[in-house]
Amino acid sequence: MTIGTSPALDTALAYHHAWTTGDFERAMTYIADDIVCDTPAGRIHGTEAFRGFMGPFVQILVKASPIAAFGDETTALLMYDTETVPVSSAPGAECLTVHDGRISHLRIIFDRAPFDAAQARAAS
């Protein structure tokens, strides 16, 4: 579900569409050089750290299904479900701050339980 449009939401959706359709290089064009990203494992800074965090996930992504998207002038919130090689359903959400068409802060939350379960099955 997407309600209306806004500058931040437009950027967030363009970024999301790029990485969820396998065009990670295009997705990176929406990332500010000095991005701060809060992840379940901690805070990362800068594009190279962000690339190191998101790149491997994009490589195992099969598809992403949007659930909801909202935004205003500077903030957008996306919620979606992902299917990856190891798990069939892993919901996630991102709160993005956008300045001048680029994402300067991203807080990403996702359910790690399906990945932990898949890793435990693989280890046994």
Image (spheres, helix red, strand yellow):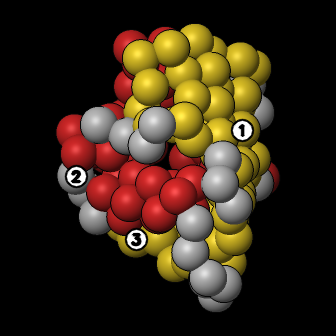
In front: label 3 or label 2: 2
Q: Nearer the viewer, mark 3 or mark 1?
A: 1
Earlier sequence position, callout 3 versus callout 1 = 3
Give the quadrant of residue 21: bottom left
- Whether label 3 touches label 1, CB < 8 Å: no
Q: Which residue is mark 2?
A: 23
Q: CA distance from mark 3 to mark 1?
A: 21 Å
Towards the viewer: 4 or 26:
4
Residue at the image position 50 percent from the left and 14 percent from the top:
34
Q: Which residue is mark 3?
A: 63
Q: Position of residue 52 (x, y in %)?
A: 42, 22
Q: Secondary structure at mark 3?
A: strand
Query: Quadrant of the rendered structure where residue 8 is?
Result: bottom right
Q: Residue at x 57, y 66 (%)?
A: 6
Q: How many numbered circles does the render carry?
A: 3
Sequence-wise, the earlier of marks 3 and 2 is 2
- Residue that numbered label 1 is attached to: 107
Mark 1: give few (<14), some (14-19) or many (20+) Cα within 10 Å.
some
Quadrant of the image occupied by residue 11: bottom left
Instruction: Give the structural element (helix, strand or loop) at label 2.
Output: loop
Q: Residues within 10 Å of mark 2 (few under 14, many from 20)?
A: some
Badge 2 amino acid: Asp
Where residue 14 sits: x, y (%)?
38, 60
Determine whether 73 is above or below 99 in the image.
below
Amino acid type, residue under disc 1 in the picture? Arg
Relative side of 73 to 26, left or right: right
For the residues marked 2 and 1, what is the alpha-carbon distance in whole angstroms? 21 Å
Q: Is residue 50 above or below residue 15?
A: above
Residue density around tag 3, few if under 14, some if 14–19, many if 20 or more, within 10 Å: some
Q: Measured from the top left, where is residue 10 in percent x and y?
A: 47, 63
Residue 85, how many percent across, how many down? Answer: 41, 59
Left or right: where 48 falls relative to 108? left
